[in-house]
Amino acid sequence: MHGKRLFTGDNINLKRDLARLATPIFIETLLITLMGGVDTFMLSQFSDHAVAAVGLVNQLIVFSILVFQVINVGTSVLCSQYLGAGKHSRMVQVTGVALILNIVLGISMSALLYFGAPWLLHLMGLRPELMQYGLPYMKIVGVFIVFQALQTTISATLRANKKAAYPMMVVFIANIVNIICNYALIFGHFGMPALGVEGAAIATAFSRGVAMVLLFVILFTRHIPSFPLALFAPFPWTEVRRLLRIGLPSAGENMSYNAQQVVLTYFINRIGNDELTTFTYITNIVMFVYIFCICMAQAGAISIGHIVGEHKPRAAYILGKYVMWISLIVTLTLSIGSASIGRPIFNVLTDNANIIRMGSMLLFVNIGREFGRTINIYATNVLRATGDVNFPFYVGVVVQWTAGVICGYIFSLVLGWGLTGMWIAFILDENIRGLIFIWRWKSMKWAKKAFV
């Protein structure tokens, strides 16, 4: 029961350690969510059609960012376990390899999103009246997606080293830059032209560039002063294989989920413009509901990664249960609260009575989804941290594409239940996976999966 004593504070107070790590991650995640929320709010004052188009484009942008997560998830897990095992030089080596790989991936993805934008948006069925907003936004944000690749890589290694305050501060600065640029370029203030959606895209790309530069400065001045050539000659292909071994199934689960969301967005787009706009608004509103869960899961994963590196599975198990319960309590409370004020929120965002009616009703339905989603966010993060990377991937692919996609298509389009039918499919998908992951954590089968 040594792990349990650790958790209660005889040697190391894991709750306090978790709180110290979770606080800056929470603030950073809140600021990132606010950035997306500010974009949506400002564009809602410009046009509901602009909101719908950008919402669909962002499904593709988010999916492309997940390509970088193949490397970043592996970076976070390996750095955490190496630090727990006292292997600092291996952590430096992994960080350098991750940066090299994501530079290559980032440039490749930038080219794909820029040159492939018209084909991808036609494939998604974006209507002509929305294409005028979606195409320029995707080209501008897409061509600079390499900034996001490097930004997230540096953030991953800083967090794993319990330096999460630095990414938090950088995102705060990027947020301010984004808001000022949005205000100037969407509506034409401070002598700038009123560019509408293109202005929002320029603001997003520029703020990401600022964040990337600041994080590189922090990386070299506060974390890793240099990358010794001896660590990369010969090139450490073993670490590349480890990154991919962790990252492919880990990011594969995220990719499967976001590919599912892209397909379901395509179905929603087929229902109508009002439904697509409502979906975009709800997506941005409920992000604020599960921010706490995301930050607790990420902080818990880093702490658990360190504990697993120290070979203390019992302490990891107890900490994991704590993370799950506190995440559930806070997220469900926030979900009920947001549903209670749903109509006033939609009244601020739009004057379309149909969107207000659908959105305020679906926020109540969404409470059922948040129970399962909270468990899934927690479980996929902490299972990866232990090295149990394949199980979440297999469960995700099977359930997401059966309960999620197949049921979503049948309920929304075949049976004609529209957006309500889609939400019923969301609830089934999230809660089935959630129950499976609870069983997995209790089984302790993850305890023998560590990479270090």
Image (cartoon, grey):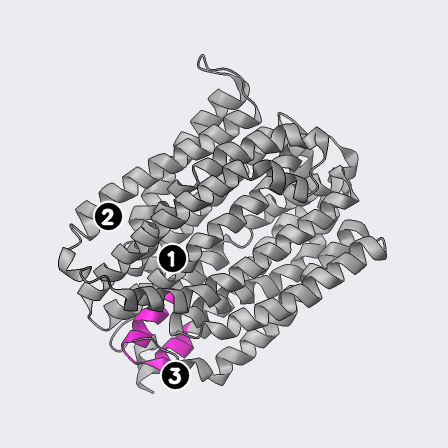
Q: Earlier in the sequence, mark 1 or mark 3?
A: 1
Q: Earlier in the sequence, mark 2 or mark 1?
A: 1
Element class at badge 3? helix
Q: Residues within 10 Å of mark 3 (few under 14, many from 20)?
A: few
**Which x, y percent locates residue 223?**
21, 52
**Which x, y percent locates residue 312?**
32, 80
Looking at this view, name the residue that lies furthest to the bottom. Answer: 1
47 up-or-down from 314: above or below: above
The answer to whether residue 438 shows anywhere in this view is yes
Which residue range is magenta in the image? Answer: 301-319
Type of residue at label 3?
A: Lys
Residue wearing tag 3: 448
Element class at badge 2? helix
Q: Quadrant of the N terminus?
A: bottom left
Q: Earlier in the sequence, mark 2 or mark 3?
A: 2
Label ID, residue 72: 1
Residue wearing tag 2: 219
47 up-or-down from 386: above or below: above
- Overall secondary structure of the magenta stretch? helix
Q: Residues within 10 Å of mark 2 (few under 14, many from 20)?
A: some
In magenta stretch: residue 307? yes
Type of residue at label 1?
A: Asn
Type of residue at label 2?
A: Leu
- Name the mark nearer the viewer: 2 or 1: 1
Residue that appears at 47% across and 49% down = 65
Element class at badge 1? helix
Describe residue 380's horizontal placement relative to residue 49 as left or right: left
Describe residue 377's horizontal placement relative to residue 426 as left or right: left
**Which x, y percent locates residue 35?**
48, 38
Residues 210 and 438: in front is: 210
